[in-house]
Image: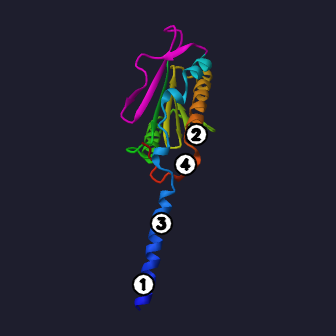
Amino acid sequence: MKKICSIFAAFALTALISSCAGSSSAPHVSEVEKISPDTLVTVEAVSTLTGVDMKIDSNGVTTDGDVTSVTYVADPAYSGDPVTISIEQFSESLTTKQTWDDYENSRIYRGDMEFVEGIGEDCYVAFPYINIYDRGCYVRISAGSGDNDEQRQLLEDLASIAAGEVERVIPIETYNEATENVIK
């Protein structure tokens, strides 16, 4: 009986050690970089898409709670509409579920929203914003106050760039394997 208990204990210890080793093979959360909204969609990309020379407004990149934003303004002033890019990205204190819930809760209250296919994991327009959820990030973009087809196309073009950058910075393998879905 002692032999059986010793074999069982050795097996249990081996299983415990190997399960701990298995969890350490998942990417560490610090391997995912924090995305700044001014790199998500650059001033050059915004200038090209709007056809107006743009610059970062005097506030620069700002953070309010878990949301980081940048606003681009026309240069010279008032020659075009401002463009604001904001991102809420999963972090040590914010899970991907929480960013999804924030995205979804924003959508639920917008009866005038329309889904957009092919951008991020989920995307919708509710003028004056386009909202994207992709790889644990909630991105929100505004580009003026219009609500016509031209405005929608501009928002979709900006959103495509933003989603592409999120997907470049956070590879799907890393996102899928991240056990905590948080970053530092």
Q: Mark 3, residues whose alpha carbon is within 10 Å: few (<14), some, or many (≥20)?
A: few
Report the residue that reaches farthest toward the bottom.
Answer: 1
> Looking at the image, is mark 1 or mark 2 nearer the viewer?
1
Which is more N-terminal, label 2 or label 1? 1
Image coords of residue 163 (percent x, y): 57, 35
Q: Quadrant of residue 59?
A: top left
Q: Which residues are magenta?
A: 51-80
Q: Residue at x 57, y 43 (%)?
A: 121
The residue labelled by disc 2 is: 167
> Looking at the image, is mark 3 or mark 4 nearer the viewer?
3
Q: Amino acid at mark 4?
A: Thr
Which is more N-terminal, label 4 or label 3? 3
Q: Residue at x 57, y 34 (%)?
A: 165
Q: Is residue 68 magenta?
A: yes
Q: CA distance from mark 1 to mark 4?
A: 39 Å
Q: CA distance from mark 1 to mark 2?
A: 50 Å
Q: Amino acid at mark 3?
A: Ser
Q: Which structural element holds mark 4?
A: helix
> Looking at the image, is mark 1 or mark 4 nearer the viewer?
1
> Looking at the image, is mark 3 or mark 1 nearer the viewer?
1
The residue labelled by disc 1 is: 6
Q: CA distance from mark 3 to mark 4?
A: 20 Å
Number of the label disc, if any, that sits on residue 174: 4
The residue labelled by disc 3 is: 19
Q: Amino acid at mark 1?
A: Ser
Q: Which structural element holds mark 2?
A: helix
CB contact under 8 Å: marks 3 and 4:
no
Q: Which structural element holds mark 3?
A: helix
CB contact under 8 Å: marks 3 and 1:
no
Q: Amino acid at mark 2?
A: Glu
Q: CA distance from mark 3 to mark 1?
A: 20 Å
Which is more N-terminal, label 4 or label 1? 1
